[in-house]
């Protein structure tokens, strides 16, 4: 059994895939397997992957399948993973040479189910740091989690028993929240070991979110926590996650993609919460005062995520006082 299996689905990324694979075969942790999943590529990336397979036959597993998307490719590869821990790398990204050694050693010392590290977003014009911190407890983890799959090392028994859902935008989000329902110990490395590449087109596409996918996924997450016997203790945090994430997505879709109407969006989100998280109005994490009830979710989301200018356009004369937002 290998120490770490790294799953790398790829589709038409001949410009970037060699950089990704090279960063893996040069890892300081030698006892790893690299699972390359050709998701129906039609460019030169297939030959690049096969050439690395020929050079490193004992380290690389090469798989081929028809194109089915990122989630489908990851799920396809999971049964082939033999590593004690599993990681995911997007095929246009790359990692530091010592990433998986540091993460594996931390996992063993801490007896952790999941280990995560910091990372850098690389855009053509700028590089943005993403810095996190160790979570105090499970509640803190749920409220402040960075819900991406690729900066984490996940115990095989957890990763292989939770499937990625075939969503356009939120597959990582739902997968990681689901993994947290099974994890007892999560450790953190305060080093930027992962480089997440994004071109400008991808940066813009991230705004075009699929709210329906997220709604369906959060209902599945709720079910997993219920099945694990952890929902009652954590329902306030899970409700808060649903409230803020659905609210934020609705805001972005309304203001960026121009889809929908403000009142319709508010009504739709409130109906969803009433049906699936019916105690949301009493949630202790939602204590923003002096905001009309019908505007509650959108006001809080704007406040939490810093949409001050957008808020000014929709509401008249909002002012901040302390940690409260007042509508006048």
Image (cartoon, rainbow, N blue to C red):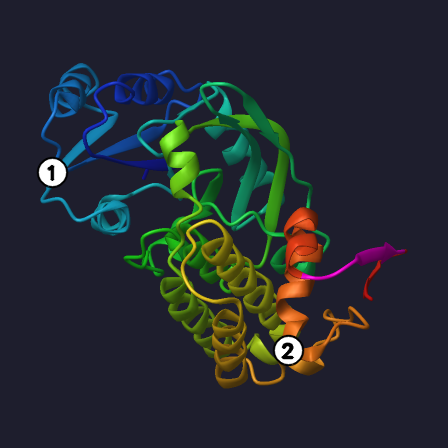
**Residue closest to the eye, 259 or 108:** 259
Q: Which element is circle 2 on?
A: helix
**Residue closest to the eye, 246 or 183:** 246
**Which x, y percent locates residue 167?**
31, 57
Q: Residue at x 45, y 78 (%)?
A: 227
Q: Tally the marks.
A: 2
The reply, left or right, for residue 284 in relation to residue 244 is right
**Residue closest to the eye, 325 or 192:** 325
Is residue 316 shown in magenta? Answer: yes
Q: Residue at x 43, y 59 (%)?
A: 174
Q: Nearer the viewer, mark 2 or mark 1?
A: 2
> What residue is pinned by disc 1?
40
Give neighbour class at mark 2: few <14, some 14-19, many 20+ (Cα, 10 Å): few
> What residue is pinned by disc 2?
294
Give the residues in magenta: 315-321
Q: Residue at x 61, y 59 (%)?
A: 142
Q: Is residue 306 above or below residue 287?
A: above
For the residues labelled 2 and 1, the Cα–Cα distance comes to 47 Å
Is residue 319 shown in magenta? Answer: yes
The reply, left or right, for residue 144 in relation to residue 146 is right
Query: Which image quarter is the C terminus in?
Result: bottom right
**Which x, y percent locates residue 321?**
89, 57
Q: Is residue 255 above or below residue 14?
A: below
Q: Which element is circle 1 on?
A: loop
Where is residue 191, by image quadrant? Answer: top right
Query: Which image quarter is the N terminus in?
Result: top left
Q: Is residue 86 visible to the viewer in this orientation of the structure? A: no
**Which x, y percent locates residue 196?**
45, 29
Q: Is residue 44 above or below residue 311?
A: above
Q: Residue at x 63, y 51 (%)?
A: 310
């Amino acid at each position: 059994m290998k120490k770490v299996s790294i799953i790398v689905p790829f589709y038409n990324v001949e410009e970037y895939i060699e950089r990704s694979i090279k960063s893996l075969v040069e890892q300081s942790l030698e006892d790893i397997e690299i699972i390359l999943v050709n998701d129906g590529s039609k460019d030169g990336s297939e030959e690049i992957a096969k050439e690395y397979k020929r050079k490193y036959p004992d380290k690389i597993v090469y798989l081929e399948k028809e194109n089915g998307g990122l989630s489908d490719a990851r799920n396809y590869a999971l049964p082939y993973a033999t590593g004690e821990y599993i990681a995911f790398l997007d095929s246009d990204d790359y990692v530091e040479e010592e990433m998986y050694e540091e993460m594996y050693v931390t996992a063993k010392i801490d007896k952790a189910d999941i280990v995560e590290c910091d990372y850098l977003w690389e855009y053509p014009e700028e590089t943005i740091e993403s810095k996190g911190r160790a979570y105090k407890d499970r509640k803190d983890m749920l409220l402040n989690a960075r819900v991406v799959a690729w900066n984490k090392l996940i115990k095989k028994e957890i990763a292989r028993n939770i499937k990625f859902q075939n969503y356009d935008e939120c597959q990582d989000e739902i997968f990681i929240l689901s993994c947290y329902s099974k994890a007892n110990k999560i450790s953190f490395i305060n080093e930027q070991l992962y480089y997440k590449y994004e071109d400008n087109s991808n940066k813009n596409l991230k705004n075009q979110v699929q709210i329906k996918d997220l709604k369906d996924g959060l209902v599945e997450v709720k079910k997993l926590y219920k099945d694990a016997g952890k929902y009652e203790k954590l329902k306030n945090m899970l409700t808060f996650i649903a409230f803020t994430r659905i609210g934020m997505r609705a805001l972005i879709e309304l203001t960026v993609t121009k889809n929908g109407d403000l009142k319709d969006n508010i009504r739709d989100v409130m109906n969803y919460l009433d049906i699936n998280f019916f105690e949301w109005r009493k949630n202790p994490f939602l204590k923003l005062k002096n905001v009309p009830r019908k505007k509650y979710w959108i006001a809080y989301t704007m406040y939490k995520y810093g949409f001050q200018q957008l808020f000014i356009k929709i509401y008249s004369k909002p002012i901040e006082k302390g940690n409260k937002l007042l509508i006048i």
